[in-house]
Image (tube, rainbow, N blue to C red):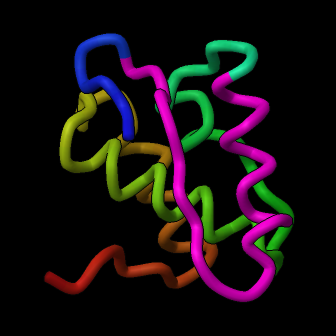
Amino acid sequence: MADPKSKRIHGAQILGPHAGEIIQEFIVAMKHHVPISELARTVHVYPTYSMTAQRALQMYWEEYGQRDSIQKYLGWYTSLTGWQGSED
């Protein structure tokens, strides 16, 4: 859960294998008031389970964030990883 206006994370819920490893990024972000945009732009070592958190943040940012400010980064990221985003 996050506030689209303040870009702050208020809560996170993860269910599945390695959930304890993945949730740590959200815990640190909430404790230190790191906005979603910063986490979405953070380079994660690939492939790791923490990439799951980054992809979730990127999908949130695409939906509610300022798309123009991260289009260049997302273009670079998708060309590097082959990630195509969510399939809705």
Which residue appears at 54% of the width and 43% of the height?
40
- Please give left or right for residue 69 compared with residue 58 in the image: left
Q: Is residue 43 above or below residue 55?
A: above
Residue at the left extreme, as displayed: 88
Q: Is residue 69 above or below residue 78?
A: above
Which residue appears at 47% of the width and 50% of the height?
57
Q: Is residue 31 magenta?
A: no
Which residue appears at 19% of the width and 48% of the height?
63
Seen from the viewer's position, the closer of residues 74 and 32 is 32
In the picture, residue 75 is in which quadrant? bottom left
Q: Position of residue 54 (x, y in %)?
A: 59, 57
Q: Quadrant of the N terminus?
A: top left
Q: Position of residue 68 (x, y in %)?
A: 24, 32
Q: Quadrant of the C terminus?
A: bottom left
Q: Position of residue 73 (x, y in %)?
A: 49, 46
In the picture, residue 30 is in which quadrant? top right
Seen from the viewer's position, the closer of residues 39 and 29 is 29
Please provide the residue range marked out in magenta: 7-30
Seen from the viewer's position, the closer of residues 73 and 6 is 6
Q: Is residue 17 magenta?
A: yes
